[in-house]
Image (cartoon, rainbow, N blue to C red):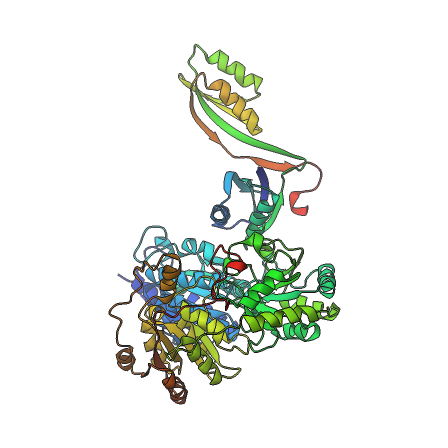
Amino acid sequence: MKYTLAVLVENKPGVLTHISGLISRRAFNIESIAAGYTEEPDMTRITIEVEADDEYELEQVVNQLSKLIDVIKIIDLTGQDRIHRELALIKVKASPKNRAEVINIVEIFRAHIVDVNKETMIIEITGEDTKIEAICELLKDYGIVEIVRTGRIAICRGPRPAKNV
Amino acid sequence: MGKPRGQMYFASDPEISWEDVENLSSTTYNGAKVLLELLTEEGVEVIFGYPGGSLLTLYDALLDSPIRHVLPRHEQTAVHAADGYARASGKVGVCMATSGPGAANMVTGIANAYMDSIPLVILTGQVPTHLLGTDSFQEVDITGMTMPITKHSYLVKDAKEIPRIVKEAFYIASTGRPGPVLIDLPKDVLAAEVQNSNPPKLCLKSYKFFSKGNPGQIEEAAKALAQSKKPIVYAGGGVITSQASAVLKELVEKTNIPVVTTLMGIGSIPTNSPNFLGMVGMHGTITANLAVNDCDLLIAVGVRFDDRVTSGLKHRFATKAKVVHIDIDPAEIGKVVKSHIPIVGDARLVLEELVEKVVPPETEKWWEQLLNWKKQYPLCYEPDGHLNPQMILEAMGTYSDGDSIVVTDVGQHQMWAAQFYPVLNKRKFITSAGLGTMGFGLPAAIGAQIAKPKSLVWLVTGDGSFQMSIQELATTVQYQLPIKIVLMNNGVLGMVRQLQKMFYNERFNQIQLYSNPDFMKVADAYGIKGIKVESPEQVNEALKKAIEIPNPVLIDCRISPDEIVLPMLPPGKAITDILGGNE
């Protein structure tokens, strides 16, 4: 099963390597990892999706991660009422002839076109990973040149921040 | 060429040459001096180190510091020496080495300390900051290399950071579950001028550990113990680290509970205590293993259910028992064996509360059973007229007292020592348990003797292990450390031979140590006394003589390569498959 963890860490060099290294050393598979600054200047939030057999196994990885000196807090967002998003930039083949068709797809998915040239265009799309996969499926027919994805980030609904949970 | 003296300049300036850095360093109040002042403040009395290019400034500053420097003959042994020092004294061990190969040589030593949760602060030299990441001369990414084997590490980029980092490093190394902390010090950072070295207040908001256990859980454990019919304590290194031996004794006296220990836990209860059933696990006593298998309450204190104890069969370990697991590291709870009553906290504080609350259980029948096993399966060997290693260890015990320390290397001799040498006190049995590092013994004995100059320090080693650190004989001579080295010399790598004999149909391979030196001549070459022991009758005289000599002594005991360690619970096998029972 896939689990989503929000890992709050001190914004220090090497902390991301430390975390990813520990997870892989304990033989867990990272599906995606996304890190960025937060509302506090010295805190970074890392959203990790890991594959684990069960909650017991997940607990082991959380316990090990919690031991890292620079880890402030780990919150398991799996199963919580949360919103998760991912951003993808997709470079797709679009000649003047079929450009309108592609634009049509982009509109249906409420995505944006952020660049265009004679042969290709770049589409920016945010949403859950299923949405991104769906648009990719449709764009495949035109020829996808390149895809870049940020990895999933997640936040809980309600007034309380994760750090206070 | 170098700039004239007296002019202001910064050591991190890429224009500056190494020569300038060195000229600057001896005159100014620099990073190295700040570092040594802070180490003194932390109570550091000795550093085990090996110099080199990137540490020149530090070694220069060391000349004016009250801290003693000990020079082992290898960077790996410098770490083992600091490790032995920490184990014998309970203090943080400090060691250092230069950048590149110096730092890389320390890796095994660091891993060894990490596995056994030994508090160390390791200082490594590093190339100047402007050369970092350029594959410059003697550069390795030591913080990267040691990431999985340190509790924490720092790469110091600015000398102003030194005070905070040193304070944090000692705090992290010595608190919670202890472990090694590495500080990587670029050459220019050590040489950089520092204005103000007032250490800031310790602020580690993300580092926390529990000391007191949850009172409700302790209450539960006390209740379980009171109701139990076959309770047992399974004590490990955590009991020694948290200084819980005294309270463990109280618990034993109050409840008459039997105790088994891990290899790391040896000495947490005197091995001659009537409640001690022996070491548990692969080469533990049959009684200890049967007792753990049959108990209805397992109080695990400061242990991690290592596969040498559980035989790698976590689902078949102590299956009839309710498990109380007391450990300061929450990640150990449930890592291997599920516990029914987990208590995260300091072993001493938790046991103190437990002792207060507990009502002694009815254990008469249990003891009847245990004593029967003890009688049926004593730890024994057959004196066959040859020089048996077990008898040497027993004899050593008769010359020891509560202050004597025995340090072991790794292999058969280590297990014989764990089985037959009587350990009367905590911090008196020093061994590489988790990592099983051959070559650990001699340098660790050096560290232990430096920590406890008045104690009798034995080193039990084998001819394989000994030759991995044999150069340290020079260190014992240089610092006049009267270590008594008992070399179990059988001309083979005994433990590997035993495994090949028992599980690989005696297809022996690469276990014969052909061309071993004449160890008497080796002793002679280093200027220490050598005594050869070839028969049982020579043992007592040799040991007596060794103790009388106020210098290091090498006792070369010629034992048979056919000696094996029994009992033996093969990995992956259950207690019923134990080898070497008397039946």
Q: Say which of A163 and B451 sits in front.
A: B451
Considering every residue shown, the one lying at the far left of the view is B515
- Residue B279 locus on image (x, y percent): 53, 68
Residues B450 and B264: in front is: B264
Vertical comparison of B199 with B421: above or below: above
Residue, x 46% and y 19% (percent of image)?
A140
User: Of all residues shown, which one is farthest toward the front?
Assistant: B583
Say which quarter of the image contains residue B415: bottom left
Front-most of residues B552 and B376: B376
In the picture, measured across the screen, residue B247 lies left or right of residue B18, that is: right
State whether residue B129 is above or below residue B550.
above
Question: Residue A138: where, in percent of width, then height?
Answer: 50, 18
Q: Position of residue B431 (x, y in %)?
A: 46, 69
- Against A134, residue B551 (above or below) is below
Q: For residue B509, what is the image quadrant?
A: bottom left
Residue A126 versus residue B123 in the image, above or below:
above
Residue name at image x 48 percent, y 77 percent = B421
Examine the image and state in which quarter residue B222 appears. Answer: bottom right
Residue A44: tell me if it is visible. yes
The residue at the point 59 percent across, 77 percent down is B273
Q: Residue furthest top?
A: A97
Q: Residue at x 62, y 60 (%)?
A: B209
Q: Nearer the viewer, residue B254 or B120?
A: B254
Give the percent coordinates (x, y) of residue A38. 58, 43
Quick check: can you spot residue B7? Answer: no
Which of the image's four quarters has the N terminus of chain B?
A: bottom left
